[in-house]
Amino acid sequence: MVTLSAKKLNTLKTNFQGLKIAVIGDMMLDCYFRGEVKRISPEAPVPVVEVENEFYRFGGAANVVLNIAKLGGIPYPVGVIGRDSFGNIFSSLMEEAGVNTAGIIIDETRPTTAKTRVIAEHQHLVRIDKESKQYIGRDIQNKLLDFIEGNIKSLDGIILQDYNKGVLTPSVIEKVIALANKHKVLVTVDPKFNNFFLYKNVDVFKPNRKEAEDVLGLKIKNDEDISEVGRKLLEKLNAKNILLTLGEGGIAIFESGKKEKRMPTKARKVADVSGAGDTVISTLTMAIAAGANIYEACYLANYAGGLVCEEVGIVPIEVEKLFNTVLEEIK
């Protein structure tokens, strides 16, 4: 059982402020159209949604960026957008959030990744995806790598946030990890299926149950399976730590040369799991960079993930809410 004293929590909270964390990965825009359905279209047997509200939110790696900012850190987003209307909206949101966008490269050959959801009276009717899954070109890769290299000495951590939309190419993954290891900068990874085993020699590798099952070609049915998955991933990736997130089953933590540990979920009432993984990797990285060990960092990240699951929609974790909730718990 991991316990944190009030003194250690207050120290970590103070240390969160101003941490510089680069978030490299697939930046997305979440678009929402909400309205009412009062009739069926005469053109086809589909509902006509009369839009009453239209709004936009950060998605994908951009949601991790927002989480870092809300936790008191200084995020360095590194990714691509297109030269299109969605890209303009994305840039405006970044500006409103006070985030420096020097690491966001405009790629003339690609659209801004956007997920548009049409919702009528709480019923999600359709999602429209606009994206390219092709790897970014060599020139764009070089621009992203130049940005990281130019800022590496000032960074406290790097998050590689992969959604398989083409930003994290094999070359980018290899070169960023090598650069971070050379300068002793913390690297954490939230992977997807493609390139799963390219993320070698990192500090923390955080797959979820489905990702681990898919890539290893097995079904996790019991505790023994969880242990086997953790051991295999440690061996294949040479990571310092493997965090296997198990949904309602909490988190399994595997550290090289040490006995595995489990942490139950901290969600008290689950309203929506959207964005919980983004919050977990953000909080975890901030906590380690602030001086927490892997178990203390997981404890905080587990709480943060539970708190955002209590909210409807993709909501970032607020630093005051996180630490106040944990402090209340240990009293």
Image: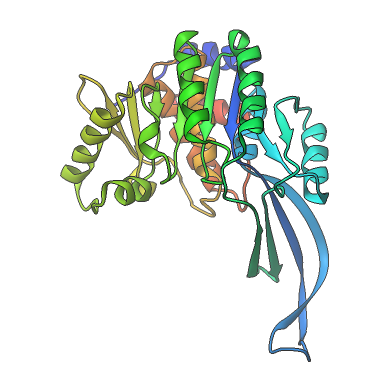
Question: Furthest residue to the front?
Answer: 138
Q: At which x and y percent is residue 104?
A: 71, 31
Q: At which x and y percent is residue 167?
A: 58, 38
Quadrant showing the C terminus: top left
Q: At which x and y percent is residue 130?
A: 67, 57
127 over 264 or under it: above or below: below
Q: Quadrant of residue 317?
A: top right
On the rendered structure, is 42 left or right of 326? right
On the rendered structure, is 74 left or right of 208? right
Q: Nearer the viewer, residue 217 or 9?
A: 217
Q: Nearer the viewer, residue 53 or 327?
A: 53
On the rendered structure, is 61 left or right of 246? right
Q: Nearer the viewer, residue 260 or 146?
A: 146
40 over 156 or under it: above or below: below
138 over 73 or under it: above or below: below
Question: Furthest residue to the bottom?
Answer: 42
Q: Residue at x 24, y 40 (%)?
A: 229
Q: Residue at x 16, y 43 (%)?
A: 224
Q: Quadrant of residue 14?
A: top right
